[in-house]
Amino acid sequence: MRARVFPDYDAMSAAAADVVAQSLEQLPSAVFMLPTGITPLGMYRRLVDMHRSEGLTFAEATFFNLDEYLGLASDHAASYHMYMKEHFYGLIDADPTRIFVPEGTAPDPEAECERYEAAIAEAGGIGVCVLGIGRNGHIGFNEPGASFDSRTRVVELSESTRKVNAGDFEADRAPERAITVGMATIFESREVLLLASGTNKAGAVAAAMEGDVSESVPASMLRSHPNASLFLDEDAASDLGRGVAG
Ligand code: GLP
């Protein structure tokens, strides 16, 4: 995994948006896997700007989201459906028939996971997968210990992840489970772009880049991917090269 350190969050976000825009220019029908969270907001803002001011079109592209909370309706304010609509899909010219987000209220969650994997395969697999990283090294909702062979499935969220995400929910109670795209599904993407910003990610970044490649640090899997990049700002890079990786 190649690491590129940018002076700040805006520069990192602009470079990430350029990766997406360039792949669309090369292949307007590109297939993307996209993350939620605070980290990608700058990239989404920049892509929306490029759509509005430079005519960048997403009309032929296909989008899959990485994850969704189990039990949350798509119109719940904290759902990833809503996040994507507010920050990206609702602001560009994406074709609604080519936008996929796992259904948190599917009556049969296991069947929903199988349907999701099948839709990814039917789209020809993922071209560019953009990821954030959790403070414990998670990618999507693949928490430490997730098998590198895993596919889209229902997972239990760790206490630490629920705590970090609690502020989005009434009474500070985040859901206990989620649907996430699996590690193997992520790994099969032709290109992976991992984004990290801020000092609270520095430990996870160092563990992923400089610790062992291990299921206990999910993002470390990307070190063996043939075409993965890590874009980070100086704060997120602040533990690299210090021998502190666990
Ligand atoms: C969340 C999401 C991840 C995201 C991560 C980091 O729990 N499931 O897909 O990458 O945590 O989020 P943030 O960018 O807000 O730090």
Image: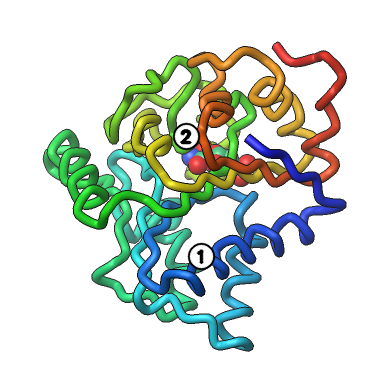
Please say whether residue 171 is visible from this viewpoint: no
Q: Nearer the viewer, residue 132 or 226?
A: 226
Q: Percent x, y for residue 87?
A: 53, 66
Q: Is residue 166 left or right of residue 81?
A: right
Q: Is mark 1 within 8 Å of ligand 1?
A: no
User: According to the image, label 2 marks what residue?
Assistant: 173
The amino acid type found where label 1 is placed reads Ser
Q: Quadrant of the C terminus?
A: top right
- Residue drawn where x is 77% and y is 61% of the image: 10
Q: Quadrant of residue 28?
A: bottom left
User: According to the image, label 1 marks what residue?
Assistant: 23
SS label for mark 1: helix
**Quadrant assignment for ligand 1:** top right
Q: How many labels were placed on the picture?
A: 2
- Location of residue 208 with respect to 182 vertically, above or below: above
Q: Nearer the viewer, residue 126 or 156?
A: 126
Q: Quadrant of residue 4?
A: top right
Q: Percent x, y for residue 157?
A: 43, 26
Which sits earlier in the primary sequence, circle 1 or circle 2? 1
Few, some or many residues within 10 Å of mark 1 (<14, 14–19, 20+): some
- Location of residue 131 with respect to 163 vertically, above or below: below
Q: Is residue 81 left or right of residue 53?
A: left
- Location of residue 57 with respect to 29 vertically, above or below: below
Q: Quadrant of the N terminus?
A: top right
Q: Nearer the viewer, residue 231 or 37?
A: 231
Q: Percent x, y for residue 39?
A: 64, 50
- Residue drawn where x is 77% and y is 54% of the image: 9
